[in-house]
Image (cartoon, grey):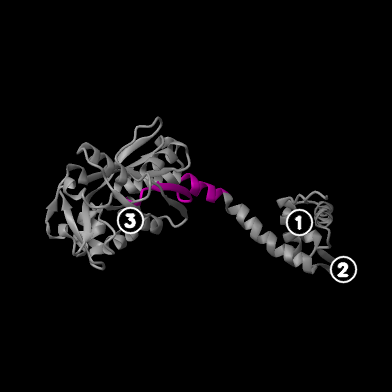
Amino acid sequence: MAKPAKIDPRSLRLFISAVEAGTLAAAADREHIASAAVSKRISDLERALGTALLHRNNKGIEPTPAGMALLDFSRRLLHDLDALPAQMTDFERGLKGYVRIFANISSITQFLPRQLSTFVANNPTVRIQLEEKVSSAVARGVAENAADLGVLVGEVNLPGLRCRPYAKDVLTLAVPSDHPLARRNTVKYEHTLSYEYIGLHTGSQLNQQLIRAASDLGRTWTCRMQVTSYDALCLMIEAGLGIGILPRHIALSYSKALRITPVALDEPWSLRSFSICSRVYGELTPAARLLLDHLLTQQPETAEGSLRARI
């Protein structure tokens, strides 16, 4: 199997110059090189590519069809090569790059969309990959360098990770509008445990919180089914398949379209704090540092404040 041809950018530049100048001699004068050297470079190109690139006649040279194709390709390639140092400078400044974020469902639903929108508007060449993970997987992913930044409930204590305060939300109970608890203004968690719940997917921080809180009361949290999104959770509640606990901001939004009723949850753990975790700041890429600074200096409103601003 023949080895791929190795093409020298210098030869491409001389080829472009020869076509533009119309003769090898004129190209040699333009590039400050001997005519024989230009001729050899182009002959080497033709041999490497296996096709004639120039028609030679007594008036000078003209590109063959293959030469015309190479001319267009070479101009684009050399333009990109010339722009490469400036692009690398942009990467160093964080103006270009690729940032991987793991985040839990609550932060993706409530806080990140608006912040990422403003960041992308100001940094359109930074590509962001966002993946939803449960909070424990968020921390593990950042620690293992599967993600640059993570957004999760609470804080984690893993070697090499730093957590910074990010946002807050409030959990509330959501029930079908004809449910007995729908008539209450507030409810204690223990008074909900005789009803079946709709939960989020296995391993979610919210499920774990509900299991722990029930255990502290000497009770059991009964989960009838698990879903992977808040819209599915609310639809199941509306259908009368169970009750659920979710961020108040989200419950209020869905209650406008669905026959569900939010009921304030009278528990200290209903107020949740979110953190952004990352590895050592200096080890992050410039783009990741730029995004982290954006998320921390332009922190979102609390979900409750954001909702009040819109209604």
- The residue wearing badge 1 is 29
- The residue wearing badge 3 is 109
**Which residue sits furthest right?**
58
Q: Residue at x 56, y 48 (%)?
A: 85
Q: Earlier in the sequence, mark 2 or mark 1?
A: 1
Residue 243: x and y in percent read 25, 56
Between residue 235 and residue 163, name the one nearer to us.
235
- How many circles with numbers are drawn on the protein? 3
Where disc 1 sits, the SS reads: helix
- The residue wearing badge 2 is 57
Q: Quadrant of residue 262?
A: bottom left
Distance between mark 3 and mark 2 Cα atoms: 69 Å
Three-letter amino acid code at the position of disc 3 = Thr
Left or right: residue 34 compared with residue 204: right
Residue 92 on the magenta segment: yes
Left or right: residue 164 compared with residue 182: right
Residue 202: x and y in percent read 38, 46
Between residue 170 and residue 5, name the one nearer to us.
170
The magenta stretch is 85-106
Left or right: residue 192 compared with residue 199: left
- Eye-nearest disc, 1 or 3: 3
Q: Earlier in the sequence, mark 1 or mark 3?
A: 1
Where disc 2 sits, the SS reads: strand
Task: Give the class, few, some or many, for how many residues have Cα within 10 Å of label 1's Cα (few <14, many ≥20).
Answer: few
Q: Residue at x 82, y 64 (%)?
A: 54
Distance between mark 2 and mark 1 Cα atoms: 19 Å
Residue 274: x and y in percent read 29, 44
Q: Residue at x 31, y 46 (%)?
A: 207
Give the label on residue 176, or none. none
Three-letter amino acid code at the position of disc 1 = Asp
Note whether residue 301 is visible.
no
